[in-house]
Image: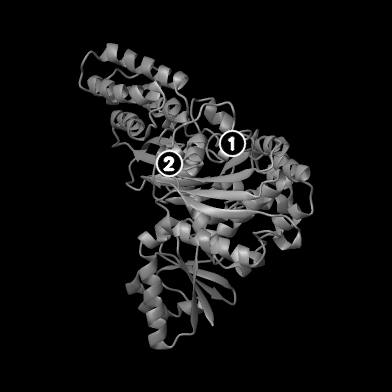
């Protein structure tokens, strides 16, 4: 029997993967083809989806993008034996976009059946948990600390420090909370992990529970991710059935329970304290800090709140050791970061690489330049509240400190590309509008400042007292930056000021002199 792989990833589905899988099965039934269709995760090369891979005696051979009408000619050409066709791509792992990646967190995504536990175990799954069960909590935390892992959700806080705080907090009950409320535009790495390798997240959360003495975990999932919810629940059920979750994990006497909770579509619940409020059944409002969630978190108990990618990076660290993970990267930015290429880019998708590669390399060597063929003018990194970088900043290495030095953020690794037809005053206005829409309303700088920001930008573009209103916009941004309760209002000035500083001509302002 020949195994044929067709992605079940949301992006692949939106491009027709479900129709391809169904049509292929119908064709197989009609022609008596001896095949098994495996629904794997996406390889992250979205411009080639729907991607079809065939398992042959010499390895997997890929074809794409495949549409239902291509299947007849593929069968005639002998694609089930890896024969040539106009859609042939060869071994996808040798593709220039893929082969230069450092796939640590995404090692299995696209390779395995995401909800098949045997497949997960056959590809080094649960080796990290096995090691963790033989260690003392302090040693687990030491591996995480030694790895240099920092929060991949955007704040980049050292994960080991957070875990150590929760481990040492005295309490009978502690919690592990996964922030899966991936709301930033142009980001999809969390979704891809949950849909393409949910067991790695489950394993990471279980290890976290062992490290700090937490027996209950929650995945706070974005409501717009129905396919991820299905995959997570299927994987959680399998983990319970085979003793990887529950009262006696693999006969160790250790306990960890896990369940998925759906959010209600509020962007602000991506902020950890708003998320905790929502998990408790309350309105998603930002909490004052201190106390930190590590001390007083969910239901008032010590709580680890980590992003999906942070927790999904834990198994490889416990499998191969903190030093192995730390050897990737540069400076204080260790390990790898899944970068998400979106917007006006020829090769959209996910690219996991060690810190240190430049933005220019990502955009042109791997992204292939703009999809329109026009010059890339501005790139927003770090979600809708990230700064816009201009062409002169494209040689900045992907490193937390290097980006901070130019008043930018790496955030969740989302990269949204705009060509030279973009109007940056509209982008700045959108940032303020976004804050108006998504603010929880608890603090004045964010709630009122964003509304006034839209009005002031309109006055500048409308040629109304330009100099006075430009100064007012800068003052307003300073107030939001310094006075907001959380990053919602505190980061909205990043895209606004970067657009104003680097592209003043789009506001009808004089271009800065060199």
Q: Is residue 218 above or below residue 505?
A: below
Number of the label disc, if any, that sits on residue 131 = none
Callout 2 crowding tier (Cα within 10 Å): few <14, some 14–19, many ≥20: some
* Mark 2 residue element: loop
Give the CA distance from mark 2 to mark 1: 28 Å
Quadrant of the image occupied by residue 268: top left
| Direction from residue 254 to residue 411 in the image, left or right | left
Which of the numbered marks, if any, corresponds to residue 184? Answer: 2
For residue 142, what is the image quadrant?
top right
Residue at image coords 47%, 31%: 286
Percent across and percent down for residue 75 are 41, 80
What residue lies at 39% left-to-right and 25% top-to-bottom? 446
Q: Is residue 62 left or right of residue 217?
A: left
Q: Are marks 2 and 1 in contact (CB under 8 Å)?
A: no
Crowding near the residue tagged with mark 1, few <14, some 14–19, many ≥20 C-alpha atoms within 10 Å: some
Describe the colour scheme in one phrase: one colour
Q: Is residue 138 left or right of residue 473?
A: right
Which quarter of the figure is the C terminus placed in?
Answer: top left
Q: At numbered mark 1, what does the secondary structure look like: helix, strand or loop?
A: helix
Name the residue nearer the viewer: 315 or 62. Answer: 315
Residue 300: image tag:
1
Of the image marks 2 and 1, the number of the one nearer the N terminus: 2
């Amino acid at each position: 029997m020949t195994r044929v792989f067709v992605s079940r990833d949301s992006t692949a589905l939106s491009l027709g993967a479900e129709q391809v899988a169904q049509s292929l099965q119908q064709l197989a039934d009609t022609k008596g083809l001896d095949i098994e269709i495996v629904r794997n995760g996406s390889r992250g090369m979205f411009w080639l989806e729907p991607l079809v891979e065939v398992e042959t005696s010499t390895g997997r051979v890929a074809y794409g993008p495949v549409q239902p009408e291509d299947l007849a000619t593929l069968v005639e050409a002998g694609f089930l034996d890896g024969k040539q066709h106009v859609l042939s791509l060869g071994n996808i792992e040798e593709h220039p976009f893929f082969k230069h990646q450092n796939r640590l967190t995404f090692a299995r995504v696209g390779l395995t059946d995401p909800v098949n536990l045997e497949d997960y175990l056959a590809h080094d799954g649960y080796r990290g948990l096995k090691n963790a069960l033989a260690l003392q909590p302090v040693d687990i935390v030491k591996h995480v600390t030694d790895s240099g892992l920092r929060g991949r959700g955007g704040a980049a806080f050292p994960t080991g420090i957070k875990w150590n705080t929760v481990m040492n907090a005295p309490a009978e009950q502690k919690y592990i909370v996964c922030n899966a409320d991936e709301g930033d535009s142009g980001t999809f790495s969390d979704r891809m992990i949950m849909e393409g390798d949910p067991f790695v997240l489950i394993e990471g959360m279980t290890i976290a529970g062992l490290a700090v003495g937490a027996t209950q975990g929650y995945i706070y999932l974005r409501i717009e991710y129905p396919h991820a919810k299905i995959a997570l629940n299927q994987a959680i059920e399998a983990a319970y059935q085979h003793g990887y979750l529950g009262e006696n994990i693999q006969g160790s006497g250790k306990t960890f329970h896990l369940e998925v909770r759906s959010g209600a579509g509020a962007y602000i619940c991506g902020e950890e304290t708003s998320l905790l409020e929502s998990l408790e059944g309350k309105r998603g409002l930002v909490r004052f800090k201190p106390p930190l969630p590590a001390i007083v978190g969910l239901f008032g108990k010590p709580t680890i709140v980590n992003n999906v990618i942070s927790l999904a990076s834990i198994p490889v660290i416990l499998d191969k050791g903190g030093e192995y993970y730390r050897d990737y990267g540069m400076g204080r930015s260790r390990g790898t970061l899944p970068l998400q290429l979106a917007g006006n880019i020829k090769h959209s998708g996910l690219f996991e690489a060690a810190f240190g590669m430049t933005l220019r390399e990502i955009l042109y060597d791997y992204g292939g330049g703009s999809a329109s063929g026009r010059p890339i003018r501005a790139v927003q990194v770090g979600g809708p509240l990230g700064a816009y970088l201009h062409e002169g900043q494209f040689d900045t290495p992907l490193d937390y400190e290097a980006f901070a030095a130019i008043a930018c953020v790496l955030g969740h690794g989302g990269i949204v590309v705009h060509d030279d037809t973009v109007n940056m005053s509209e982008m700045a206005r959108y940032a303020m509008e976004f804050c108006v829409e998504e603010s929880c309303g608890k603090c004045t700088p964010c709630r009122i400042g964003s509304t006034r920001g839209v009005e002031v930008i309109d006055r500048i573009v409308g040629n109304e007292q330009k100099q006075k209103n430009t100064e007012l916009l800068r003052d307003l941004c300073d107030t939001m930056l310094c006075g907001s309760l959380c990053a919602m209002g505190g980061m909205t000035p990043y895209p606004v000021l970067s657009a104003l500083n680097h592209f003043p001509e789009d506001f009808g302002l004089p271009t800065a002199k060199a």
